Amino acid sequence: MKTTMKFSAITIAFLALFAACEKEETTIPDIEGVYEGTLTGLTLKTINGGSDQMDATSEITLTGDNEIQVHCYADGFDTT
């Protein structure tokens, strides 16, 4: 009787775990494009004449499977 109860409990736990681990294919929306925002940091004080913020633009392009390229630029700042 105890063996049957243990087996039943293990079977139920296994089925619950298996159902919880089901992985579905998710689709990621298109992220390519141009984004505008603000760069903030202590190192910007020397670039921007004393201010720790500057407006910046980032261009995101898809370069391959699961790979992107980010080109970020602003006044006195340009990196890829």
Image (cartoon, rainbow, N blue to C red):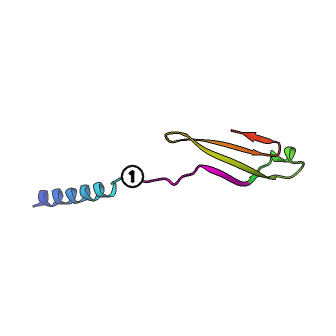
Instruction: Tell me which residue sits at (45%, 53%) in the image.
Output: 27
Q: Residue furthest right?
A: 49
* Image position, residue 17 (x, y; %): 30, 56
Say if the magenta span includes residue 52.
no
In this image, 8 relative to 69: left or right?
A: left
| Residue underneath mark 1 | 25
Magenta residues (range): 25-37
The front one of 23 and 74 is 74
The front one of 3 and 64 is 64
* Image position, residue 24 (x, y; %): 37, 54
The front one of 64 and 7 is 64
- The rendered magenta stretch, by its main secondary structure, is classed as loop
Instruction: Tell me which residue sits at (76%, 40%) in the image.
Output: 78
* Image position, residue 68 (x, y; %): 57, 42
Query: How many numbered circles are shown?
Result: 1
* Image position, residue 59 (x, y; %): 66, 46
Say if the magenta span includes residue 30.
yes
Helix, strand or loop at mark 1: loop
Instruction: Tell me which residue sits at (17%, 58%) in the image.
Output: 6
Q: Residue furthest left?
A: 1
Instruction: Tell me which residue sits at (51%, 54%) in the image.
Output: 29
Mark 1, other Cα within 10 Å: few <14 / some 14–19 / many ≥20: few
- Which residue type does callout 1 highlight? Glu
In this image, 30 relative to 58: left or right?
A: left
In the rendered view, would you say 28 is above or below 67? Answer: below
Determine the image quadrant of residue 61: top right
The front one of 37 and 61 is 61
Locate the C terminus by quadrant.
Answer: top right
In this image, 41 relative to 80: left or right?
A: right
In this image, 35 relative to 32: left or right?
A: right
Locate the N terminus by quadrant.
Answer: bottom left
